[in-house]
């Protein structure tokens, strides 16, 4: 094979190969970029989710906020029993307004509700609540 | 069709040539190696196939040779030539490959050289044993020389441009190469730009990591996610259920009991207006709750 005979084609051919190589590099970067972006987005959203979940369910001030459930109704209507991070509370003879206030507080607290039991007797309500955090 | 192009006899001592129109060239034996053989071969293409083997060991190494074959009476004439060497010589004499039409060999015009044909002051072309050779002019003497006349173009020749094989001229090749390289540079630049565009995402991730160094370990993150995702899903479901059950308290409807634990839930309503029961039932069914009629109203229940 006499390369000198085909030197013109060789010059153009090598330049064409360089161009194709550059095109492949660009395509690789584009698809690589999409993958990198997906990976980054997934890492960022995962991290954000972890931070958010930790802020909600691992809140260090949660105990203080749980204590508010004891004071949300008159002390005579509550039997409060707290052991470490577990609370059992028994509310007696709550009016509808007291019940509403209590429910609002409970539903907005990031605690694991193990039991919620509401019974109406006459015009008043009895509530059993067991939760942990 | 007869080829009427001018024929230039090419030899080492020839002067520079200037030509604007394509010309034919005839090579003197200075540019080829010749061998004659009597072979039981009928066609030229068959002879050409064995040409290379006939010249084994006779040709200069390091060059590429092509072969030309033609029949001379009962014998086959094999000619080996280096197109590379010939082209280089042509260029040194001002003959560009693209200005050349056909290439012939002096042996093809044997009858024209039966009388010594003057090439230069010192050399002539002559025929010895039916072979055209270059010999010193002093050997034949000036009186034996034939007058310089036009040599007719032989019938069969080599088309130089196709033999030279270049489809592209130098300028075309350089033009194409420049365009291809320009595109290559553009593609590389674009590729690098695409590669750098993920910086923003990476910076966001880094800043989040910096703000929460305790979450830098993948294991820690996964363990937190596993623990809290489960709690989050279950607790959200409980709260949504309570909201749905409370949302069914319309006018003349009272909540008698509501029970929710880890497994499931139930609620009993006292309904004073009978026509409210239908509405509540459809509401409960929409929320995919099980509905049961009780003595003074309805009871709904479900699993978490």
Image: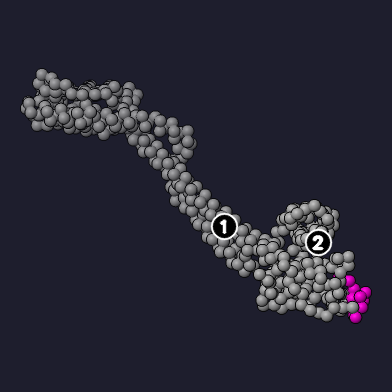
- Residue beneath label 2, please? B73
Q: Is residue B136 magenta?
A: yes
Q: Position of residue A67 (x, y in %)?
A: 27, 29
Please identify, in this view, whether the residue under mark 2 or under mark 1 is nearer the observer: 2
Q: Name the quadrant containing residue B104.
A: bottom right
State whether residue A109 appears in this view: yes
Please state if B218 lies on the left or on the right of A61 as rendered: right
B55 lies above or below B87:
above
How crowded is the residue under tag 2: few (<14 C-alpha within 10 Å), some, or many (20+)?
few
- In the displayed structure image, the side of residue A14 where residue B133 appears, left or right: right
Residue range (magenta): B134-143
Q: Compared to A15, does B283 lie above or below?
A: above
Residue at horizontal 11%, vertical 27%?
A: B277
Where residue B68 appears, x then y in whole percent?
A: 76, 61
Q: Residue B216 versus residue B243: which sits nearer the camera?
A: B243
Which residue is labeled 1 in the image? Answer: A19
Residue B85 percent location from the top left of the image: 77, 65
């Amino acid at each position: 094979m006499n390369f000198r005979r085909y030197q013109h084609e060789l010059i153009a051919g090598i330049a064409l190969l360089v161009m194709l190589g550059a095109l492949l590099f660009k395509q690789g970067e584009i698809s690589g970029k999409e993958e990198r972006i997906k990976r980054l987005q997934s890492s960022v959203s995962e991290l954000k989710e972890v931070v958010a979940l930790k802020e909600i369910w691992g809140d260090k001030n949660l105990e203080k906020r749980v204590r508010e459930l004891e004071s949300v109704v008159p002390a005579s209507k509550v039997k409060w029993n707290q052991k470490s991070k577990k609370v059992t509370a028994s509310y007696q003879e709550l009016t509808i307004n007291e019940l509403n206030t209590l429910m609002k507080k409970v539903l907005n607290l990031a605690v694991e509700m193990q039991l919620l039991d509401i019974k109406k007797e006459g015009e008043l309500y009895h509530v059993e609540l067991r939760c942990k955090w | 069709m007869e080829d009427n192009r001018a024929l230039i006899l090419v030899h080492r001592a020839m002067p520079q040539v200037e030509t604007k129109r394509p010309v034919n060239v005839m090579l003197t034996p200075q540019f080829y190696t010749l061998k004659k053989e009597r072979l039981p071969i009928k066609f030229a293409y068959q002879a050409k196939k064995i040409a290379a083997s006939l010249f084994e060991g006779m040709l200069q190494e390091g060059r590429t040779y092509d072969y030309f074959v033609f029949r001379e009476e009962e014998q086959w004439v094999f000619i080996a030539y280096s197109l590379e060497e010939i082209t280089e010589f042509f260029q040194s004499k001002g003959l560009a490959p693209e200005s050349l039409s056909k290439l012939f060999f002096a042996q093809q015009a044997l009858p024209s050289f039966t009388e010594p044909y003057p090439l230069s002051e010192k050399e002539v072309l002559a025929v010895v044993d039916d072979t055209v050779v270059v010999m010193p002019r002093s050997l034949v003497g000036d009186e034996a020389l034939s007058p310089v006349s036009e040599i007719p173009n032989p019938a069969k020749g080599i088309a130089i441009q196709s033999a030279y094989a270049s489809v592209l001229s130098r300028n075309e090749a350089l033009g194409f190469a420049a365009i291809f390289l320009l595109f290559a540079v553009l593609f590389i630049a674009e590729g690098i730009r695409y590669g750098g565009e993920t910086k923003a995402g990476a910076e966001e991730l880094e800043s989040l990591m910096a703000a929460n160094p305790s979450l830098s370990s993948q294991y820690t993150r996964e363990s937190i996610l596993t623990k809290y995702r489960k709690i989050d899903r279950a607790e959200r479901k409980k709260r949504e259920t309570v909201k749905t059950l409370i949302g069914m308290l319309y006018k003349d409807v009272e909540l008698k009991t509501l029970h929710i634990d880890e497994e499931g839930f139930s609620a009993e309503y006292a309904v004073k207006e009978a026509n409210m029961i239908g509405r509540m039932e459809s509401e409960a069914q929409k929320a995919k709750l099980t509905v049961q009629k009780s003595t003074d109203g309805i009871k709904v229940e479900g699993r978490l």
